[in-house]
Image (cartoon, rainbow, N blue to C red):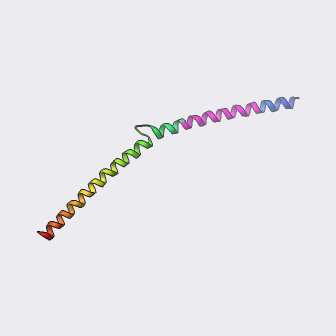
Amino acid sequence: MSSTAQEIALMKQRMDNMDEKLDKMDEKLDMLTKSLLDPDKGVTSRVNQNTSARKTMTKAIWVLYAAVAAALAKIFIG
């Protein structure tokens, strides 16, 4: 009978350990979610800032192309 009691105690200990691990995993998941979705420093915010910068850079490059084309046209035409 003592082996049954020992097995039950061992199962209880393993269940307690599993609860602790699940709590730690839940904390890590909360931290990960916060770091991903934080409106100021999260990944989503950084991606949006990168997209905005890329659009601005594209506009600047097109203005530069237009200026170079206009300068070349002025040299060759007039």
In-image side of 46 versus 68 (left or right): right
Quarter-of-image position of residue 28: top right
| Image coordinates for residue 47, horizontal then vertical, percent | 41, 46
Q: Disc count in the image?
A: 0
In-image side of 50 versus 29 (left or right): left
Overall secondary structure of the magenta stretch? helix
Quarter-of-image position of residue 29: top right
Check the image and name the residue furthest to the left.
78
Quadrant in which the N terminus is drawn: top right
Judge by depth and name the residue closer to the eye, 50 or 3: 50
Q: What stretch is highlighted in magenta?
A: 11-29
In-image side of 20 versus 56 (left or right): right
Quadrant in which the C terminus is drawn: bottom left
Residue 77 located within the stretch drawn in magenta: no
Give the answer, above or below, for where 5 lies relative to 66: above
Quarter-of-image position of residue 15: top right
| Image coordinates for residue 18, horizontal then vertical, percent | 68, 35
In-image side of 40 versus 29 (left or right): left
Query: Residue at image x 48%, y 36%?
Result: 34
Check the image and name the residue furthest to the bottom.
76
Query: Residue at image x 78%, y 30%?
Result: 9
Query: Residue at image x 30%, y 50%?
Result: 56
| Image coordinates for residue 37, horizontal then vertical, percent | 46, 39
| Image coordinates for residue 25, horizontal then vertical, percent | 60, 37
Query: Residue at image x 21%, y 64%?
Result: 69
Residue 17 located within the stretch drawn in magenta: yes
